[in-house]
Amino acid sequence: MTTKQPDNTALRTALWRALHVLTDDKPYIIEDKVGYDLIKPEKDWQERPDMKYTKRLRASIVARARFVEDLAKEQIGKGVTQYIILGAGLDSFAQRNTEIISQVDIYEIDQPNTLTWKEEKLVENGYKIPDNLHFVPVDFETSSWWTELLNKGFDTTKTTLVSCTGVTLYLTKEAIVDTLKKMTSLASGSTIAIAFYLPLEQLDEDDKPMQEIAIKGAMASGTPFVSFFSVDEIVKLAQEVGLKEIQTVSTKDMTEKYFKGRTDNFVPASGEFFLVART
């Protein structure tokens, strides 16, 4: 019997990634329909308001997915043998990159409901769960993701890549600082890539109305957005906790890298940026 449903955000972002392949022009930024295959959404799902009227947000989701995927492939190619996906949702890197992942232990960290559902659906749909894919269920309000990670056999002496998208919006500043401090416990030379969100007033005018709707919707569903940061604030936080080689990657950087020359008006919404740094 299937357990409780995964987090709504995990479902929505997986369907946005699939919708990109189903409705947008080629070349695709990333080809990922695994989550769609697991969810098997209702017949008219593409007509839902959160699908139909969110093209720029969908572009942001596929941009960040591609950015993280490129970084993971690069780091694994350089010999990194551990990859932590913090807030994994229905991430499908392991399912779509079977040759690469034989070289790396992947630790997917998320809420218990999401990971239990995902594991059941993967098995139901004929995916094998390899020994080096570790699901790390964490109730973020009552337990430490770091402790749960160590309990799953994570090795702090090996260089590691950490990706974290769609998480910081829901955490307090204190929790974010604590998370960044934990990152500094990773082996020297490890890489982290964490997505943060700009305050409403720093968004492009086109994106403000959609973000205001998203903020109200998140509040109404009991998962309010908590933390927004300017780029300068995040760089300062990263410096204070002792991270090195600090870079930020903006929406404009992503647009230049992945969306140049498109004629279908498929461009990411402003508002999200990545902190990329080393330990």
Image (cartoon, rainbow, N blue to C red):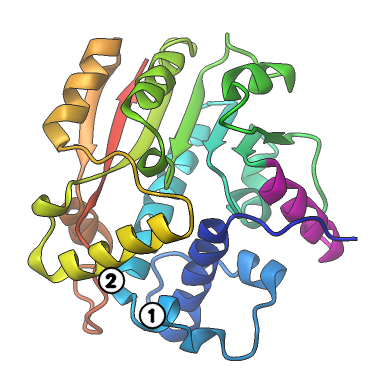
Res. 78 in view? no
Q: Which mark is residue 56?
A: 2
Residue 55 lies, in percent from the top left, at 32, 76
In the rendered image, the quadrant that contains the N terminus is bottom right
Precedes in sequence: disc 2 or disc 1: 1
Q: Which mark is residue 26?
A: 1
Q: Is residue 279 above or below residue 23?
A: above
Most common secondary structure along the magenta stretch: helix
Tell me if residue 107 is in the magenta stretch: no
Q: Is residue 33 above or below residue 91?
A: below
Badge 2: residue crowd in 10 Å (few <14, some 14–19, many ≥20): some
Please give the name of the residue rendered at 53% of the width and 70% of the height, measured from the top-left corner: 15
Residue type indicated by callout 2 = Arg
Q: Quadrant of residue 32?
A: bottom right
Please give the name of the residue rendered at 9% of the width and 52% of the height, measured from the top-left corner: 201
Q: CA distance from mark 2 to mark 1?
A: 16 Å
Q: Is residue 26 above or below residue 96?
A: below
Tell me if residue 125 is in the magenta stretch: yes
Q: Secondary structure at mark 1?
A: loop
Q: Is residue 49 left or right of residue 122?
A: left
Of 61 and 101, the residue lying toward us: 61
Q: Secondary structure at mark 2?
A: helix
